[in-house]
Amino acid sequence: MPVDYSKWDALELSDDSDIEVHPNVDKRSFIRAKQNQIHQERQQRKLQIETLKYERLINDGLMKRISGLLNALKAHAAEAETRNPAEVAFQAVMESAGNPADEKPPPRPEGVHAQLEQPPTYTKMMATLLDQVNKELDEKKPENRYNAMVDEIGVHLKKVEELQQELLKKLAELEKEEGRKITSEGIHEGFNSSHVAKSEPSASGTKKADESKVELINPNFSMSKPAESKPSTTAEDDDDKEVEASPDARKFAYIKPGDYRESHSYIGSHPHILSEKETDGLLIMAFDAQLDGKDDFARQCVHQALLLQYCRALGKDGVALFFKRITTKGHQAQDVFYKDVQDTYYRIKNRAAEINAQREADGGSGEGVEQIQLHAVEPGTEIKIKIPPEKSEDEGEKRGREIFEGFAPDMQKALESGSLDKVNEVLGKMKVADAEEVVGLLSEAGILSLEEQIIDATTEEGQKHLKEMEEQAALESYADDPE
């Protein structure tokens, strides 16, 4: 029987000892370069496979929700002929809402889209999709808006399905390429076992499967994840700093949740707050308030943020439709909306509690928290605060005024008070790097100046302070001339 050696053709060797190179090229360096090239290509191919699998998983969840919405719209198509189409569409959206427990997409594998933000929730994806559909309908202005909405959503579903087919095709090509070569990672030793079965006397009434127990030689070893490391948690999310609600949206956040007439009126006079950015900004406000222990205001911000999101997602007449449904006693839309508000708030509350606990642990470790504080070093001197005037012809004062107006409101308020203690209080809440930057800007703007301290020796406090200064001066004199 002839021996088939064709399987060895798939071997991928990273160090060919019989390779021939130019006499002027170092052979070992060439082999190492070839090895690195093979390893890099292999790692890149594996990362692409993991990325495609993850993208298909996300798209599967999105397709499930789009299909549910499309089926709900088609089921109510007959009602749209006799009722208000916008109300029927709102009812379909509510019915197709997924389980809140499945709102968050699955976590990304390590290395996949590491430079990008975490994917948004499926509710936010659907809200963005409905925004696009409504914009397209506003441009086309169809006679039957309900049927046109069904058609547009069907077009978007088809696009996602086509994308899934493209990803599947690419994935199959990469997996075929990966399996074409035999590498050391694909070698499995069939006679090695990670467990030992021990026979034990069987007791009466026990099943045969219980007659032997499995004892792992190394119970802490994982074949799939040999060196899994836990991601480090940080107390604050840097991405949140980029999102901030506008002043109008901040005013909207202070409207009480039950005052729907006031909220409706405010949106009517400030329609520009119906944007995804303002929704995110109010959720950041809720998170900050929860960190400060302001539970009621945090829940209020969540309520107003989701109110804007629902109004935006319901299309052209979404504002009027939302307030009509939410104020109708016993309507099912109320349960859906309030449950969404409650679930979102508790997610924020739990995360804020984790961060506060971490801060307390860091603060109680005995090492203390590093802070930047301003103090006069020389005895008999004090730091004075001088804010540059608003209208000045001097270029230096103009620059100083620009720097002052660029500070956060709490820092501006502390500087205007003229109290160094209040300035230090604001600096103490900052990170060290941020506080150092602020101190540098204060110096550049000429806001801080070192002046001699005037002591009133006619008062008891002044005499005490003068005595302390004299003692300090005597100690310094002794240190300079110990003899």
Image (cartoon, rainbow, N blue to C red):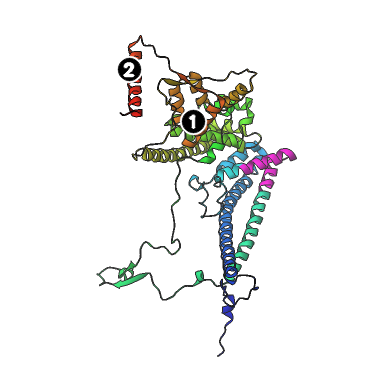
Whether residue 372 is situated above or below residue 460 in the rendered picture: below
The quarter of the image holding the N terminus is bottom right
Whether residue 380 is situated above or below residue 347 in the rendered picture: above
User: Residue pushed farthest top?
Assistant: 458
Q: Nearer the viewer, mark 2 or mark 1?
A: 2
| Dot 1 amino acid type | Gln
Marks 2/1 in contact by CB < 8 Å: the verdict is no
Task: State the image coordinates of residue 241 (x, y, percent, origin top left).
Answer: 54, 37
Magenta stretch, main secondary structure class? helix
Q: Which residues are magenta?
A: 128-153
Q: Nearer the viewer, residue 364 or 159?
A: 364
Task: State the image coordinates of residue 80 (x, y, percent, origin top left).
Answer: 65, 40
Q: Residues within 10 Å of mark 1 (few under 14, many from 20)?
A: many
Whether residue 249 is situated above or below residue 189 in the rendered picture: above
User: Residue pushed farthest front?
Assistant: 483
Q: Is residue 80 visible?
A: yes
Q: Nearer the viewer, residue 441 or 376?
A: 376
The residue identified by callout 2 is 467
Task: State the image coordinates of residue 447 (x, y, percent, origin top left).
Answer: 53, 23
- Element on which disc 1 rests: helix
Q: Which mark is residue 446?
A: none
How far apart in space, not on screen, are marks 2 and 1 (Cα)?
Answer: 56 Å
Q: Residues within 10 Å of mark 2 (few under 14, many from 20)?
A: few
Query: Which residue is at a point 48% across and 35% down the rendered structure image?
Result: 287
Which of the 4 image quarters holds residue 60? bottom right
The residue identified by callout 1 is 300
84 sits to left or right of 215:
right
Task: State the image coordinates of residue 85 (x, y, percent, origin top left).
Answer: 65, 38
Which of the 4 image quarters holds residue 130? top right
Q: Is residue 407 visible?
A: no
N-terminal label among 2 and 1: 1
